[in-house]
């Protein structure tokens, strides 16, 4: 269905056909119920109010638009000559308008939240603008905003226009324009959307992975900026959202040989994002201690190594190149690296109460396969000799899942190193290549699952850093929600980790895309959610505590994504609706009984309520059904 639609629109968009008229098919009277109606007359009375001295009164629709939607107007007659019907959609930052005349349909997107993008005197900037000619009798006008990050316009169910769309839309209205001295009328109505029905079946006897948890990496310099009250609120957020896996970004390139500056924030290797103040790599043992006091765990993994832990290296075979296409000419000194990790474990045990539960081989830095293998076996031996037998090892993180597949495949060639590896892992920045059609990423997920060879997988870094997607919209966050579901159900991921838990930013798009929280200096340096990313991750994390195991769940609708968990006494079912229609659920899970339901959407930030008699999931909404409450109430 989607492919047929795209082919139709792409054909119409070709230069040779772009200005040719599309002959509209006849359409029968829609079966859907007519909702709010409208009547326009070009010579009708002026609408009340200021700033529009001679405009016909507009019609305002008072339904809040869901993140994904399909809305259709039925027209009782042709749009009169010399008139124009404008269907205006608005959101917090930007909007779009569909204009229909007797022979054309136009779609344009506009931005109105940034004065810097406008020329003097303008109130908005046109982002995209496209018009199609048509012949025939337009009787239905449909606008579809879907999970492919697009907006499409149909006349009489014929696709005519398609544009990318990443921002949120929340309201819509109609405006009619025509000669005020002539009597031209247009009548019609907005059709009512009825929910579809879908079944979800859970097979509790089909068990999968046990969860280790959710979390991410704190920027310790950003955390240090929080006030005392801000830090109290921060840990309350961590507790309520079950973000209790701390993935260390520890001291790396600036680390001294005696490790004396391992937790010195002044030596933190800076991370620069635009013109923001630097965030950095450094450890905070008190932060780790508080993580553990809440029942959390620590994953330790260095990025760039200090100069005294690397050496020039000439490979036996072909040279390799890193993710930035630079030839790898150095290599880690495995024994030195192992010494750093063991010494960190000793200090962590002394100062935070325990060594890290997991240590990673290295974050994103490319090494030759034989070096990764040597680092793994050297680390396992050093940990065991030092008494840290319970600390487990995660394979080296790659920035892209496709590179993770190659690393796992290469590691299998070194049996001792593969045996010493407890977890496979990867970052998933290549998911952004498929953000408008996430199902195309399934092939890479399947390849990583096969390459893992039965070892559990950790999704260690997820966020949006592609310049095309620097918008703090719920629609983009929902695409990441699809990845969470896929990681859990196709990769059997035992951890889901966002990139940064907190990041110090001035330019808000960096915080919205890369971190869950930012310090708010306007409110006394307290942490505030940077975007909708927190609530989307919360839909998965808040009711899935450590130790729950996933059980098989399936849906009768491919656009209704589900994942189910239990620990034998408690149950959780998470359902994400990526269709453009509301879905009324029929759930078959023998023995399950839910007492709480949580809604997550543009409008609902993880709002937990009693379970209604009938459960309907709005388009773009995530619902979480559980037999227990998440820790909702903030501590005083």
Image: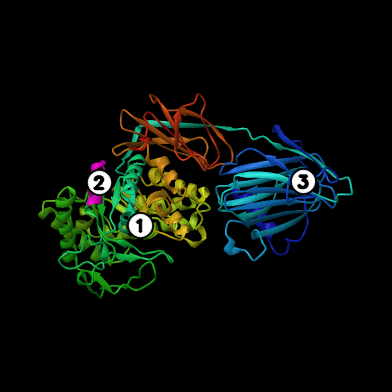
Q: Distance of mark 1 from mark 3, alpha carbons?
A: 49 Å
Q: Earlier in the sequence, mark 1 or mark 3?
A: 3
| Residue 280: in magenta span | no
Q: Distance of mark 1 from mark 2, alpha carbons?
A: 35 Å
Magenta-tinted stretch? 286-296
Q: Nearer the viewer, residue 623 or 440?
A: 623
* Residue 135 percent across, percent down from the top left: 81, 52
Question: Pointer 2: what residue?
Answer: 290
Whether tag 2 and tag 3 are in contact, CB under 8 A, the answer is: no
Q: Nearer the viewer, residue 335 or 175?
A: 175
Quadrant position of the C terminus in the picture: top left
Question: Pointer 3: what residue?
Answer: 25
User: Which element type, helix, strand or loop, lies under badge 1?
Assistant: helix
Q: Earlier in the sequence, mark 2 or mark 3?
A: 3
| Residue displayed at 19% across by 49% down | 352
| Residue 293: in magenta span | yes
Whether tag 1 and tag 2 are in contact, CB under 8 A, the answer is: no
């Amino acid at each position: 269905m989607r492919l047929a639609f795209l082919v139709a629109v792409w054909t119409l968009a070709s230069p040779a056909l772009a200005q040719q008229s599309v002959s509209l098919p006849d359409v029968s009277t829609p079966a859907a119920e007519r909702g709010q109606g409208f009547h326009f007359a070009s010579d009708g009375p002026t609408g009340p109010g200021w700033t529009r001295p001679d405009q016909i009164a507009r019609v305002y629709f008072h339904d809040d638009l869901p993140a994904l939607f399909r809305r259709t107007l039925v027209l009782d007659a042709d749009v009169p000559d010399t008139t124009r019907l404008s269907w205006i959609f608005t959101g917090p930052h930007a909007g779009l308008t569909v204009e229909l005349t007797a022979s054309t349909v136009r779609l344009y997107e506009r931005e109105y939240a940034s004065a810097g993008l406008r020329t003097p005197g303008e109130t908005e900037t046109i982002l995209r603008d496209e018009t199609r000619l048509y012949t025939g009798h337009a009787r239905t006008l449909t606008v579809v905003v879907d999970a492919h990050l697009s907006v499409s316009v149909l006349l009489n169910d014929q696709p005519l226009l398609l544009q990318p769309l990443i921002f949120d839309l929340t309201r819509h209205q109609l405006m009619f324009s025509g000669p005020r001295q002539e009597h031209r009328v247009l009548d019609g109505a907005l059709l009512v959307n009825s929910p579809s029905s879908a079944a979800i079946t859970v097979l509790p006897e089909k068990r999968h992975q046990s969860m280790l948890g959710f979390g991410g990496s704190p920027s310790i310099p950003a955390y240090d900026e929080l006030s005392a009250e801000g830090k109290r609120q921060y840990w309350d957020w961590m507790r309520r959202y079950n973000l209790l896996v701390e993935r260390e970004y520890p001291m790396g390139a600036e680390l001294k040989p005696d490790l004396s500056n391992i937790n010195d924030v002044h030596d933190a290797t800076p991370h620069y994002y635009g013109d923001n103040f630097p965030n950095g790599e450094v450890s905070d043992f008190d932060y780790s201690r508080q993580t553990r006091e809440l029942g959390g765990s620590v994953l330790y993994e260095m990025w760039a190594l200090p100069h005294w832990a690397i050496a020039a290296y000439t490979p036996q075979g072909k040279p390799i190149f890193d993710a930035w296409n630079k030839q790898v000419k150095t290599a880690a000194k495995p024994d030195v690296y192992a010494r750093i990790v063991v010494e960190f474990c000793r200090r962590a045990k002394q100062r935070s109460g325990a060594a890290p539960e997991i240590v990673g081989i290295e974050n994103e830095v490319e090494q030759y396969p034989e070096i990764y293998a040597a680092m793994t076996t050297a680390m396992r031996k050093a940990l065991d000799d030092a008494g840290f037998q319970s600390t487990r090892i995660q394979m080296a993180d790659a920035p892209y899942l496709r590179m993770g597949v190659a690393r796992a495949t290469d590691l299998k060639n070194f049996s001792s190193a593969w045996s010493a590896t407890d977890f496979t892992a990867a970052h998933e920045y290549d998911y952004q290549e498929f953000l408008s059609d996430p199902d195309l990423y399934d092939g890479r997920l399947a390849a990583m699952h096969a390459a893992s060879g039965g070892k559990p997988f950790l999704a260690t870094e997820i966020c949006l850093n592609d310049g095309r997607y620097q918008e703090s919209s719920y629609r983009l966050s929902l695409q990441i929600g699809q990845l969470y579901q896929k990681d859990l159900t196709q990769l059997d991921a035992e951890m889901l980790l966002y990139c940064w838990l907190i990041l110090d930013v001035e330019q808000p798009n960096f915080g919205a895309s890369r971190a869950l929280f930012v310090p708010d200096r306007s409110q006394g340096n307290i942490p505030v959610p940077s975007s909708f990313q927190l609530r989307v991750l919360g839909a998965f994390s808040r009711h899935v505590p450590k130790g729950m195991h996933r059980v098989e769940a399936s849906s009768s609708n491919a656009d209704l994504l589900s994942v189910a968990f239990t620990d034998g006494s408690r149950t959780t079912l998470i359902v994400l609706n990526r269709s453009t229609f509301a879905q009324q659920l029929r759930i078959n899970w023998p023995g399950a009984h839910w007492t709480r339901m949580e809604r997550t959407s543009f409008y609902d930030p993880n709002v937990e309520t009693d379970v209604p008699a009938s459960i309907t999931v709005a388009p773009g909404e995530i619902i979480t059904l559980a037999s227990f409450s998440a820790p909702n109430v903030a501590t005083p």
